[in-house]
Every structure is written in structure tokens, then in C-alpha cells.
Image (tube, grey):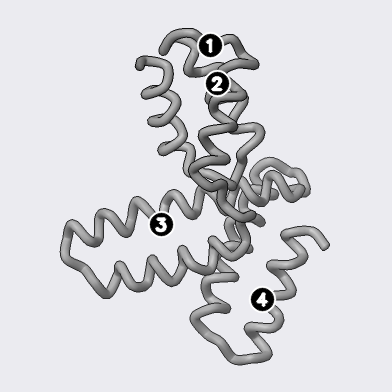
Amino acid sequence: MTLKARIQEDMKSAMRALEKEKLANIRMVMAAIKQREVDERIELDDAQVLAVIDKMVKQRRESIAQFQAGGRADLVAKEEAELALLNAYLPSQLGDTELDALISETIAATGAASIKDMGKVMAAIKARAAGRADMGAVGARIKARLSG
């Protein structure tokens, strides 16, 4: 079953169970997927659906930080609920040791020696760890490794 089909099935089960909040969040995900399909006039595959969900996760994390800074606990709770639902559709996250091993392996494979080579390393890791790691944190680790 594709990821998009799984999301659609979850939407149907949320409708049947009368879970209004979950249904609204799933519809939001489906709308984002459909919007991208209409904009690009394509049918999204699992990798592209993951990219849409990953973008939404990043937006939720940024919103949570902003709402916490503004003292809006009600909006923080709403965003965290949406984030939890989105995380359910992402593959399991890489652990610190796995991430460090992937970075070391990619640096060796690309022959990166300085901070100037960070783009090559990031591109290679992004292809292999899509949806399984926060690319902002990965970028910071790569920068530390290449400059140190």
C-alpha cells in the first residue's frame, strides 16, 4: 500500500470513528499532497509524499518555536498534535550513531576535505536519509566535522 493510500484509509477510519481533530489534520495533509499534484500535474509517489510531509513537519516545528516564544500555549498544543500525526507517516528516525556513521561514510565517499565540500555531502545524505533525519541538525554536524 502506498503512503498516499494509507493516509486516505486513515482519513476514512477517522470519519467512521468521528475523530474530528484527527480528521481535520489528515485532510490538511491530503490537501497539501493534492495541491502539489495539481501544481505539478503529476501523481506523487511515496518519496514525493514524504517530501511534502517532511516540509509540513518542518513548518510545525518552526511554528511551535514561535508560539512558545510568544507564550501561546494553546497554539503550541495544537501544533504539537499536528506534528504527532505527521510523524506517524514518516519512517523511523535515524539514531545518533547511525547518523554519524552515515556522515562519515558520505564524507569518505565524496572525498570532502573542507567546508567548501559541504554541499556535495549534504546532497548525498539528503538522498539517503530523506524523511529519516532533521536536515538542519545534519547540516550542523557536517559543518562541525568538516571545519574541525
Sequence-first disc among 3 and 4: 4
- Name the element at disc 1: loop
Kindly report the distance in space between the C-alpha atoms of the residues bearing marks 1 and 2: 7 Å
Give the vertical position of 73 relative to 65 (above or below): below
**Residue topped by disc 4:** 11
Q: Amino acid type of disc 4?
A: Met
Question: Quadrant location of the N terminus?
Answer: bottom right
**Residue topped by disc 1:** 112
Q: Amino acid type of disc 3?
A: Arg
Residue lying at 61% horizontally and 24% vertically, measured from the top left:
105
**Residue topped by disc 2:** 121
Instruction: Tell me the crowding category of disc 1: few under 14, some 14 to 19, or many 20 or more residues within 10 angstroms, Cα based.
Output: some
Sequence-first disc among 1 and 3: 3
Q: Give the left or right position of residue 31, taking residue 68 as reference.
A: right
Residue lying at 68% horizontally and 75% vertically, measured from the top left:
10
Question: Quadrant location of the C terminus?
Answer: top left
Q: Amino acid type of disc 1?
A: Ala
**Occupied quadrant, residue 73:** bottom left
Q: Give the left or right position of residue 36, taking residue 134 as reference.
A: right
- Name the element at disc 3: helix
Give the vertical position of 92 relative to 25 (above or below): above
Sequence-first disc among 3 and 2: 3
Sequence-first disc among 1 and 4: 4
Sequence-first disc among 1 and 2: 1
